[in-house]
Amino acid sequence: MWRSIQLITLYCTIAIAEEGSFLGASRQLRIHHSALSRRIRHLELMLGVALFERHPGGVKATAAGERFLANLRRILNDLDDALEQVGAPGSGKSVQSPIGLDASPCKCAFLKAVAGSMGRDPNVAAFIALLRKWDPAS
């Protein structure tokens, strides 16, 4: 099951939690809100638990969603650290600087790896534009 969950879906989950709404996250990610909603609904079905309580004013993470998000942030930070270590000085690869946003658990190295893994996804251009907006080196 877990192998079929896309990294972009996990990143979208965090963006929704940070924005407090699907609409706000869809604007930030430049993904249509209905596509974002379907992506998260599919994730919730795969996990067998609701991650967000939906209401007219936005969303709030459920208790299960809070636990999932806390673990997800830790895992994504660990992944980002692993990617940075691969590109450590002396390894011949460049190291990306953090994006510098306190609210975001992810750094550019991880986000660029996610963008690279998306291949033929139609939202790649919008996602890369979002990365460039956050990346102080751009």
Image: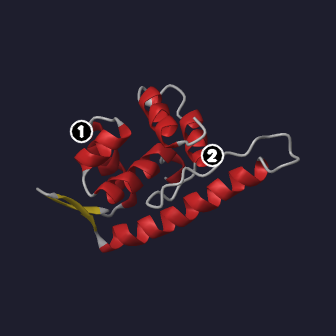
Relative height, residue 50 to residue 122 (above, below) = below
**Label 1 belongs to which residue?**
34
Horizontal side, residue 122 vs residue 44: left or right? right
Residue plotted at (43% across, 47% down): 9
Residue plotted at (33% across, 49% down): 40
Pick whichever, 41 or 78, lies toward us. Answer: 78
Residue plotted at (47% across, 38% down): 133
* Quarter that holds the C terminus: top right
Residue at mark 2 to residue at mark 1: CA–CA distance: 28 Å
Q: Is mark 2 on a helix, strand or loop?
A: helix
- Label of residue 95 in the image: none
Horizontal side, residue 29 vs residue 87: left or right? left
**As drawn, which residue projects farthest toward the right?**
90
Locate residue 35: give its quadrant.
top left
The amino acid sitting under disc 2 is Ala
The spot of residue 87 in percent (x, y) is: 77, 47
The spot of residue 115 in percent (x, y) is: 54, 36
Horizontal side, residue 12 vs residue 115: left or right? left
The spot of residue 31 in percent (x, y) is: 33, 35
The spot of residue 130 in percent (x, y) is: 44, 37
Query: Would you say residue 6 is visible in this rendering?
Result: no
Horizontal side, residue 54 vs residue 109: left or right? left
Neighbor class of circle 1 (other Cα within 10 Å; few <14, some 14-19, many 20+) is: few
**Label 2 belongs to which residue?**
109
Which of pointers 2 and 1 indicates the residue nearer the eye?
A: 2
Q: Are marks 2 and 1 in contact (CB under 8 Å)?
A: no
